[in-house]
Amino acid sequence: MQRRAFLKTLGSLSAIPALGVSSRVMAVSTQANRMLLIFLRGGYDACHLLVPTASQFYYEARPNIAIARPGDQADAALPLNADWGLHPALHASLYPLFQQGEIAFIPFAGTDDVSRSHFETQDSIEMGMGSNGTRHFQSGFLNRLAGILQSDGQAAMSFTDQLPLIMQGDVQIANTGLRRLARPNTNQRQTSLITGMYAQTSLAQQVSEGFSMRQEVAQEMQEEMNSANRNAISTKGFELEAKRVAHLMRDKYALGFIDVGGWDTHVNQGGASGQLAGKLEELGRGLLAYKTEMGAMWRQTTVVVISEFGRTFRENGKRGTDHGHGSVYWVAGGNVRGGRIVGEQIRLEPGQLFQNRDYPVLNEYRSVLGGLFARLYGLSAAQSQQVFSGVTPRDLGLL
C-alpha cells in the first residue's frame, strides 16, 4: 500500500500523527540553527497587519476597516517607520520584537500564481516549483531542504495532523498534531489493532513509531498541564500549541512546519478590533510564547510566517476583503536583523495595484526564501538549486 493511501485511509485517526522516522529522534546539536515555517491558510489581510499609514489611497479604499494613522486615536497603528505601522492588537507581542530588532516584514511578497484559489496557490507555494514549469505534486520544498540538512544529522518535523505537501517527498518526515494531545482518539486496544493491521506491511515500523511518538509527547504535555496554576493559558488556541512546538524544536528538530487556518475574512473583518484583530492578537501571543519557550536557543532561531496570497486593497461591500495577490511575510528570531521593512517596495497610489485591485508581487517567495535558507544553513549554489530549481537566491540581509 502506498504511503499516501495509508494516510488517506487513516485520515480520521489523528492519533497516528508521526510516520516515517523514528520517534526516538536524537537531540539536535545546540549549535544548529532552528527554523519554523508558519503557514497562514486562507490568505490573511496583509494590509491589516502591516498598515500603509503613509498612503492616503489606503484610507480612501477602506473607509470602514482601515487602521488609523499613529497618533490619530487611541487604537491607531503602532509606528514602525515613515511609511508603515503595525496593527494595535500586536502592541504587546510583535511590536516589542520589532523595537528589539527581532522581527522584520517583507511587503509585496508572494508567488506568480494568479489563480486566487486557496488550494491552487497553496499547492504552488508548497511545491516551490513555479507555475510555468514542470510540477511535482509529491515534492515539497521543505522536504527537499530537509534532505540536505539530514546529511548533517538535522531532523525535520511537521506539527500537523496530516503530512502537508510542503513536507512530502523523498525524505521520510514525521508529523504530529499537538492541539489535542490530552484526548487521544484511540485507546490502547485500538492502537494494538491498528498496529497489528500493518504488522506484515512495509509501513509496520512507521505506524508503531508513530504511536510511540504520540505517547511520548502526550506524556510530557500532560505533565505540563498538571503543573499549571490558575493563571495558566487555555488549552485551546495557538499560544499553547506554539509552546509545545518550541519544546520539541528546542531539543530535537532543526526544521519545523505548522499551519494556522481561519484567515479568509470576506465578511465583517473588523478594524482595530473585531474578527481579524483577535486572530492577529492570538498569533502574536503565540509567537511571543514560542520565543519564551525556546529560551537561550532563540538566539539561533528563525521563524518565517507566510500565506498563500494577500487580499484586495479595497474593502468589499460586506466590510471584509476578497482574495488578492501580494502579501506580507514575516521573519522573526534572535538571529534576525529585524526592526526593518525590507525588500522591494512601491508607494501605494492609484495605478500601482496589480490588476487595479491587489498588492503586486515584487519579492518572489522562492528567491526570498532561497536567500534566507542559504544564509541560515550555509547552502552552496548547488544545494540552493535542489530546494528551488532555476531560482537565484536573493539575500535581503535578514541574518
Image (cartoon, rainbow, N blue to C red):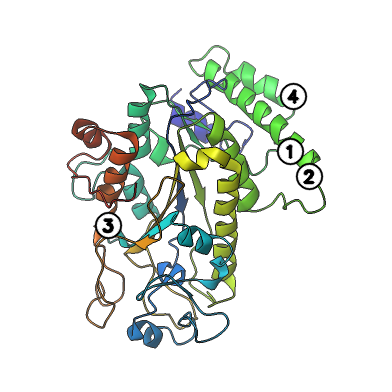
As drawn, the residue found furthest toward the top would be 200
Q: Is residue 37 left or right of residue 361?
A: right
The count of marks equals 4
Q: Residues within 10 Å of mark 3 (few under 14, many from 20)?
A: some
Q: CA distance from mark 2 to mark 4?
A: 27 Å
Tag 3's secondary structure?
Answer: loop
Q: Is residue 160 left or right of residue 381?
A: right
Quickly name the residue at label 1.
224
Give the mark nearer the N terminus: 1 vs 4.
Answer: 4
The residue under label 2 is which amino acid type? Ala
Give the mark nearer the N terminus: 2 vs 4.
Answer: 4
Quickly name the residue at label 4.
188
Quickly name the residue at label 3.
113
Position above or below: 38 against 4? below
The residue under label 3 is which amino acid type? Asp
At 38% from the left and 88% from the top, the residue drawn is: 60
Q: Residues within 10 Å of mark 4 (few under 14, many from 20)?
A: few
Give the mark nearer the N terminus: 2 vs 3.
Answer: 3
User: Can residue 245 be seen at all in this image of the molecule?
Assistant: no
In the rendering, which numbered label is found on residue 228?
Answer: 2
Q: CA distance from mark 2 to mark 3?
A: 46 Å
Give the mark nearer the N terminus: 4 vs 3.
Answer: 3
The residue under label 4 is which amino acid type? Gln
Q: Looking at the image, is mark 1 or mark 4 nearer the viewer?
A: 1
In the rendering, which numbered label is found on residue 242?
Answer: none
Tag 1's secondary structure?
Answer: helix
Mark 1 vs 2: CB contact within 8 A: yes
Q: Which quarter of the picture shows residue 135? A: top left
